Amino acid sequence: MHQPSDIEIARAAEKRPIREIGAELGIPEEALLPYGHDKAKVGAGFIAGLAGRPRGRLVLVTAINPTPAGEGKTTTTVGLGDGLRRLGHKAAICIREASLGPCFGMKGGAAGGGRAQVVPMEDMNLHFTGDFHAITAAHNLLAAMIDNHIYWGNALGLDQRRITWRRVMDMNDRALRQVVCSLGGVSNGFPRETGFDITVASEVMAILCLATDLDDLQRRLGAIIVGYTRERAPVTARDLKADGAMTVLLRDALQPNLVQTLEHTPAFVHGGPFANIAHGCNSVIATDTALRLADFVVTEAGFGADLGAEKFMNIKCRKAGLAPAAVVVVATVRALKMNGGLGKDDLGAEDVAAVEKGCANLGRHIENVKSFGVPVVVAINHFTGDTEAEIAAVQAYVRTQGSEALLCTHWAEGGAGTQALAARVAEIAAADRANFAPLYPDEMGLFHKIETIAKRIYRADEVLADQRIRDQLHAWETAGYGHLPVCMAKTQYSFSTDPSLRGAPVGHSVPVREVRLAAGAGFVVVICGEIMTMPGLPSRPAAEGIGLTAEGAVEGLF
Amino acid sequence: MHQPSDIEIARAAEKRPIREIGAELGIPEEALLPYGHDKAKVGAGFIAGLAGRPRGRLVLVTAINPTPAGEGKTTTTVGLGDGLRRLGHKAAICIREASLGPCFGMKGGAAGGGRAQVVPMEDMNLHFTGDFHAITAAHNLLAAMIDNHIYWGNALGLDQRRITWRRVMDMNDRALRQVVCSLGGVSNGFPRETGFDITVASEVMAILCLATDLDDLQRRLGAIIVGYTRERAPVTARDLKADGAMTVLLRDALQPNLVQTLEHTPAFVHGGPFANIAHGCNSVIATDTALRLADFVVTEAGFGADLGAEKFMNIKCRKAGLAPAAVVVVATVRALKMNGGLGKDDLGAEDVAAVEKGCANLGRHIENVKSFGVPVVVAINHFTGDTEAEIAAVQAYVRTQGSEALLCTHWAEGGAGTQALAARVAEIAAADRANFAPLYPDEMGLFHKIETIAKRIYRADEVLADQRIRDQLHAWETAGYGHLPVCMAKTQYSFSTDPSLRGAPVGHSVPVREVRLAAGAGFVVVICGEIMTMPGLPSRPAAEGIGLTAEGAVEGLF
């Protein structure tokens, strides 16, 4: 039998007009700004009017450490949303927008899979509603204004060697990682070293995803530090008078996008910050809007729970006053086997021992999430080859951790495959058992915050950092940034900073290579290991196979 | 009395829902892809179905050589469209989209002015429907694939010193004009010199504006020459397998945008190629679609008639099989005075002699346009300070040229101010008096084509070109590109290549500095003088004053 591909399923989907999706949440048609007939932005005026309403329950979907075998976080987010809606609940999901650049590198979209997808899939993996292009433009306007300021006399005294604001492009383009600009003589400015990051790595992206309204957006944009003077005094976007124009460029982009799942569950798809040098969650505005309109909102966070859930709790929830009512940790038998030591080619045969060994990774994530005061349910995202004994082993292990693991078949069956999970999650969330608190208080010192995460989440013995880095953190504390949360950038493949250390490593150290202040986003980025902020294309980029079919459909993108 | 500003008038406008604007042209609602409630793209499927329909009459609005005093080409295009519609004709206008970058440099939008504007003005000067962002992405994807191809072994043998494809950004950013990329070591590629142009200067922009459908678009994109091998053999986007993915990125952008004038006349706003290194007109698809749906279509071309109308006729009309039924040459008394030798500060007092002297510029444009076999009407775009004697002088002069000059007050009165012009244009166009032919045949040699334009349009004595340039043109002829039209890039301020030579200079030479082959767009660019393809920001960029008001409106953009 032909197993339909994700794109075949998505294309065959009968989408409802987006005004009907909005109507299900009580959004009047005039509050929707349509982009075609299947996408809309929810108007800022309508959102402002929701402020007084109570919030529904927030459910976070996170996962064990990712492996090449896949976990299915977005797929589970979609499936759980559909499952809750099938049970009669007013439910919505919130996920991130896809970045354009990577679509032309390795195949693969970011809208779920199988029968648990968000549509229109093609649009979501291309320009969508233009949010990322707006972010690119706002980011690069600031960059142009920096060099222009220097060109016309540099009244602010920016030290050209200390400009930290780079440019961005939503493209995988390694040639732009490091450039010398302003060459060619007097009329082109003062040559200096700089480079490009991919748009999702922009601080503007993180700001858009944390801002609560246009005023807050402009305040945060203005606070961006673009560089320093020779006296090491910070120069901000506000000093350059760029914050107003940047806000204008982002005015539409700040309004969350509404689409639908294959089962017509309302889906907010908005923002997409990197999960390493940024916090990796969809926008606060989308989550908050969904919570004012639905009884249950299912959302996700990037990478494994050590990075994604930690940042969701310590950055997004702390800053936005959100509190999850329950957390779902997604695991697959295949990924647990890899965490248990198997290679990618050895996943075909039943291996209960490997599953049991890999469960240590899952167990630690469960324990970590519980340490935030939030109840945990495990979703076993079913793959065809999983055996009953393997599944039973996971379930038995999770019971020993005081939680419950439910088998989900949403990839093959959509919301019908998550009925048990949805019922359990709804029960837990509605019981208000959560007693959420971030891991550390605002007033804790910056280095102490890093240590807290490293020891309590990563289970490291120590944090290694040069005096230079410690001095920098102290300097920021003195300058009034000590209250900020820290945003850890490390490999997503391990609790440690060594990507090859699967399972539940102990006794490791966390070396801090660099710290960066994202004063507009409102966090201190702590870089542990090599972090790539501008990907490259592979030797055979997916772009080579992308094109339109004779019928005008997109092929090769997924 | 307070004279309302353009933006105040635009904001006060009562826009009709875009589906009503479409309905006036017979476009069913399901063929419109809405972007908000006041913008829509016209679906490709609907457009394909129009192929058999007869075309309405096409009216080109062009102008005398621009001066700092202004002419009002777009304003007149809008006013004439409104005027024709007031007379009961089924009319539409076609204009170019605005570039984002310049909006943050010098104040000023590109949607007409006064009572003759296209709305929504704010959107049109910001992201609009995302077309330019799509062009930027498609252009830069090709750039990334070039460097990626070299990185992974350079199987096509591209000579890194002979890569002609640069990158683009829709921003005024002089720091990007000339850069060295791929610095930083092995993993970032091979360092080389390159740079960025502004998006409107991209060949992809010219291609989008000349393509007739998606197949033609992909064929043209594939034909783009990105550089040469050491053996001087061209390497194309098709060789790099980039044409399919670029087409996918441009699929939505190729569909023309429909908005409205203040008087609800349907306005197609689509594409915006540079008027120097490209042909400076809105898209062929928009013009052709409008002509299938309306009885009269008013459109414009960039700069003065020596550049804009010449390229409209010799490139756009030739390639798209279009033929204008009439041409309107816009002049203002103030600009004629400047052409007559007055400085910008001397325009306040009546000076009939200066007007008469400046009419030489107008007269030559009339004669040039007539040489294409198309009847000409002059529109005097009225400014408050114009005196009756000055206006009468223009009208008398134009009569001596065998044409007619009609006073228009559309800036102050909208379509009511162009009733005489509209009636005359409709009469001439409906009489089918035009006998349009391009200035030169396809089979004429490339250098001969340049000479023909220089002598017959610019009235130069000679074209100066190094042997290197003549050899290059011969080489392209040998390679099969000899049939292409030439796209002249020279100053817009004079018939000559010296911007300070106003009026109707004679006896000058046209020095050709450089020639470039735009094989995808389908023309040879002939650069005469300094042409800037990446603008810079001024010392006090408009961006510094742009922001949102407390009510959420954009200020400082216009």
Image: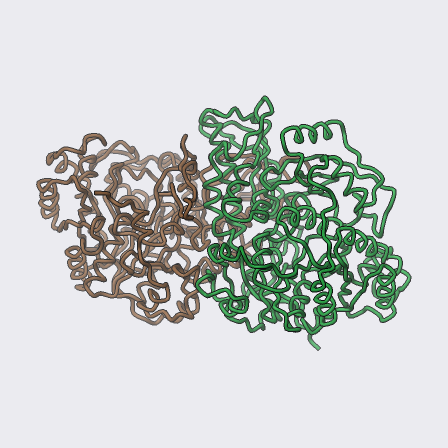
Chain colours: A green, B brown
- Horizontal placement of A227 versus A455: left or right? left
**Residue name at image x 36 percent, y 34 percent:** B529
Residue nearer the viewer, A166 or B520: A166
Q: Nearer the viewer, residue A454 or B27?
A: A454
Q: Quadrant of residue B540?
A: top left
User: Residue B547: x percent and y percent?
Assistant: 43, 42
Q: Position of residue A428 (x, y in %)?
A: 73, 64
Tell me: residue B75, above or below residue A148.
below
Q: Residue furthest right?
A: A353
Q: Quadrant of the C terminus of chain A?
A: bottom right
In the image, B76 versus B319, the foreground residue is: B76
Instruction: Give the quadrant of residue B333.
Output: top left
Pick the residue in front: B356 or B520: B356
Q: Is residue A506 in view?
A: yes
Q: Locate residue A348 relative to residue A437 in the image: left or right.
A: right
Q: Position of residue A326 (x, y in %)?
A: 72, 59
Total number of numbered discs in the rendering: 0
Q: Position of residue B413 (x, y in %)?
A: 20, 52
- Is the residue A228 above or below the residue A385 in the image? above
Residue found at the far top of this picture: A231
Residue B456 is at least partly visible in this image: no
Task: Assign the N terminus of chain A to one quadrant of the image.
Answer: bottom right
